[in-house]
Structure formats: C-alpha cells, structure tokens
Image: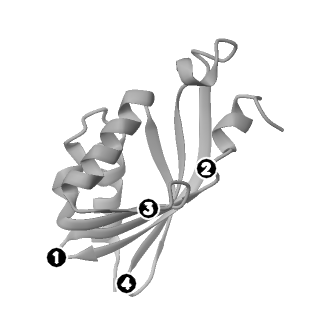
Amino acid sequence: MAGEAEIEIAKKLFAAWSSGDVDAPAEFLTEDAVLHDVVDGNDKVGWPAIREFFGAALKISPDVVLEPNAFWVNETGIAVRWRMSATAGEMFGPDVKGRKWHSDGMSTLEFRDGKVCREVDYHHGGAILRSLGITG
C-alpha cells in the first residue's frame, strides 16, 4: 500500500518537473519508467525518452510550474491533482505573449523500489488556450 513516503516522493518529483532543470526528475524515476501524457497520446519509455519529451516542453515553457494540491493513495500508487502554469511565449501569438497561462490536471503514479515507474498525466489540451482567452 502506498502512503506518506510516496506522497513525499511525488512532491519532490513535481518540484523537479518545476525546476527548469531537464535532468532534475531523473532521480525520482526508475530507468525504465513510462510517462504517458493523454494529450500527446504516446508512451515515453525510459529516462532518455522522458528527458527528450520534457526538454522539448522546457524549450516552449522554461518557467513551467507543476503545483500538486491533493493526493489520493491506493494499493498500487497515488493520484495527484495539480495545476500547471507558465508564461506564454511566441507560439501563442503576440496578443498573449508574456501572459501567464494555467491548466489543471491529475496524474497517477505507480512506484517500484521507492521510485516512480509509471506516470500517467490527465489534462485537457485546450485548457492552456482557454486560460489565455484564445478559445471559448
């Protein structure tokens, strides 16, 4: 049964995702970890693939912050509700460049030997645009 130790690891992992350091999450993930983002729809298997995905995201949003705000524990791991935010860059257009955006989501984390072996991120792909007032 997962518990407080796993919640602490999750907090550290989310701080690592928020650090701006592409290598920071590695210490909290198994070498063969799987990251699945429902918007992207593909599994990133192993740290090199996860690092590549995360590095590409940091190039778009270098100041991204993932703030966990609730945790649920079950026998295989935990679920984490979070808010992701960053500053809008060029890709969102000149009218919103420099404004803060946000997207709420949830992740499930499974653990093996004190590290995350599988993370599945659930969020709506249009939430960022909605938060910037680009779409209704």
Disc with the residue nearer the chain's start (1 vs 2)? 2
Q: Residue at x 76, y 29 (%)?
A: 134
Task: Give the quarter of the image for residue 5.
Answer: bottom left
Q: Residue 6: in sight, yes or no?
A: yes
Please state which amino acid type lies under the numbered disc 1. Answer: Asp
Q: Which residue is mark 2?
A: 104
Q: What's the distance in space between the residues labelled 3 and 2, CA to CA?
A: 20 Å
Disc with the residue nearer the chain's start (3 vs 2)? 3
Total number of numbered discs in the rendering? 4
Q: Which residue is mark 4?
A: 76
Q: What's the distance in space between the residues labelled 3 and 4, CA to CA?
A: 22 Å
Q: Which residue is mark 3?
A: 42
**Up/down of 128 relative to 98, above or below:** below
Residue found at the very far top of the displayed protein: 94
Q: Nearer the viewer, residue 67 or 107?
A: 107
Q: What's the distance in space between the residues labelled 1 and 3, CA to CA?
A: 25 Å
Q: Nearer the viewer, residue 132 or 71?
A: 132
Please state which amino acid type lies under the numbered disc 2. Answer: Asp
Disc with the residue nearer the chain's start (4 vs 2)? 4
Q: Residue 78 location in percent, x, y?
A: 42, 73
Please state which amino acid type lies under the numbered disc 4. Answer: Thr
Please state which amino acid type lies under the numbered disc 3. Answer: Asn
Q: Residue 52 location in percent, x, y?
A: 28, 45
Task: Give the quarter of the image for residue 4.
Answer: bottom left
Q: Which residue is mark 1?
A: 113
**Up/down of 83 relative to 118, above or below:** above
Q: Residue at x 26, y 54 (%)?
A: 49
Disc with the residue nearer the chain's start (1 vs 4)? 4
Give the color scheme: rainbow, by chain, secondary structure or one colour.
Answer: one colour
Q: Is residue 82 rendered to the left or right of residue 48?
A: right
Secondary element type, mark 3: loop
Q: Nearer the viewer, residue 9 or 56?
A: 56
